[in-house]
Image: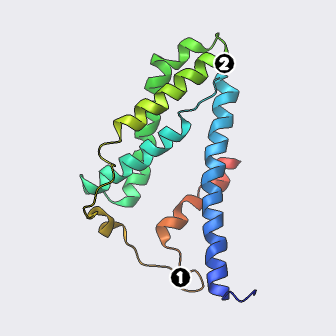
Amino acid sequence: MFGVPLQVLFGQLLLGLINGSFYALLSLGLAVIFGMLNVINFAHGAFYMVGAFVAWMLLAYFGIDYWWSLVIVPIVVGALGAVLERLMISRLYRLDHLYGLLLTFGLALVIAGCTAEPRAASSGPVTSAQRLVTTSLTPPAALVSERRLSPILPEPAIVV
């Protein structure tokens, strides 16, 4: 179709579905937080990054398997979010939306700054990336690994 092999086209469509599921989860999280807490959460993406960073640390430094980290990471990030909500965000519920926006924007900057050094760009090789290589599924989805497919599985249950 259009001069593109069907296997490549199917792989690209599947990658689009995977990326779309990530965007849907992020937007649902923002909508739920604003609907329940009445706070515009600019730190939502930073918490998403913290989850990826914790998963990387579990793999690189503690040797915890990818599938176990899928269980551990939401608990860690949820606990961090609950602590920050109790200590900081809960004090802004009765105030104007601008205060919540400024606080969460500042939190996003602080979180990004705390993780800047370990994830800083360097010219050295990334040794932990070798452990992330997985076997691919059988054709026609040979371009997509099982780990890239894992976010799609809970998506329908979360949306409902």
108, above or below 102, in the image:
below
Residue in the picture at 53% in, 21% down: 103
Residue in the picture at 56% in, 86% down: 139
Tell me the element at label 1: loop
In the rendering, at what x and y percent does residue 65 appear?
33, 60
The residue labelled by disc 2 is 97
Find the residue positioned furthest to the right: 2
34, above or below 122, in the image:
above
Which is more toward the observer, 8 or 160?
A: 8
Which numbered disc flags the more N-terminal residue, 2 or 1? 2
Question: Are there few (<14), some (14-19), or many (20+) residues within 10 Å of tag 1?
Answer: some
By what rule are the colours in the image chosen? rainbow
From the image, state whether disc 2 or disc 1 is nearer to you.
Answer: 2
66, above or below 36, in the image:
below
Q: For the residue marked with disc 2, what is the amino acid?
A: His
In the rendering, at what x and y percent does residue 6 appear?
67, 87
The residue labelled by disc 1 is 142
* Relative horizontal placement of residue 49, taking residue 132 as reference (left or right): right
> The N terminus is located in which quarter?
bottom right
Question: Are there few (<14), some (14-19), or many (20+) residues within 10 Å of tag 2?
Answer: few
* Relative horizontal placement of residue 1, taking residue 135 as reference (left or right): right
Residue in the picture at 64% in, 27% down: 40
Q: Quadrant of residue 21?
A: bottom right
In the rendering, at what x and y percent does residue 74 appear?
46, 43
